[in-house]
Image (tube, rainbow, N blue to C red):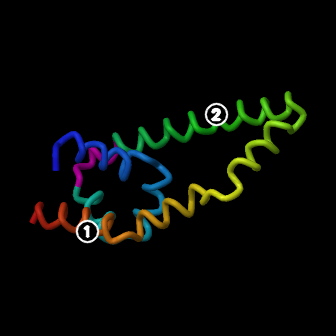
Amino acid sequence: MASSDFEKLLELYIGNPDVFDYAYVNCPEYKKFFDSLSVDIQNKFRRAHAALRVSNGAYKFQEGIFHVATFGLSYGAKKLFNRNKKSKKELIVEMVESEEFIGFFKALNNKGE
């Protein structure tokens, strides 16, 4: 695997606070990998998670104002276009419970031993 691909996977798997919250609790291999990182690196990820949560909250607030300004029409259109798609939570659960995800962290943990 190229180092840029590896970095992208780590960014997706550890840098995303929603993935982190679910995977840390539900995937022992993920938890073992994260806990093996230095405290400094763990704290950097936690600060990044906090910053992303704030920016996501600001986006949801802006989206809400837009829905109010359009008298709910934009909300209805959004629901119409997204009605058959899986929710973000469902996608995260599916990804974390996949063999590829678990295998990725097993391989990382085995490399460190």
Residue at image coords 36%, 44% = 45
Question: Which numbered circle lies on residue 103?
Answer: 1
| Rendered position, 106 above or below 20 | below
Coordinates of residue 23 in the picture (x, y in percent): 42, 63
Is residue 40 found inside the magenta-colored segment of the image?
A: yes
Question: Which numbered circle lies on residue 50?
Answer: none
Coordinates of residue 111 in the picture (x, y in percent): 11, 62
Q: Please, what is the dominant secondary structure of the magenta stretch? A: helix
Near mark 2 (Cα within 10 A), the count class, few <14, some 14-19 or many ≥20, is: few
Q: Is residue 75 left or right of residue 61?
A: right
Residue at image coords 55%, 41% = 53
**According to the image, label 2 marks what residue?**
59
Is residue 92 found inside the magenta-colored segment of the image?
A: no
Specify the quadrant of the image occupied by residue 85: bottom right
Q: Is residue 59 left or right of residue 104?
A: right
Magenta range is: 37-43
Quarter of the rendering occupied by the C terminus: bottom left
Q: Nearer the viewer, residue 46 or 85?
A: 85
Specify the quadrant of the image occupied by residue 97: bottom left
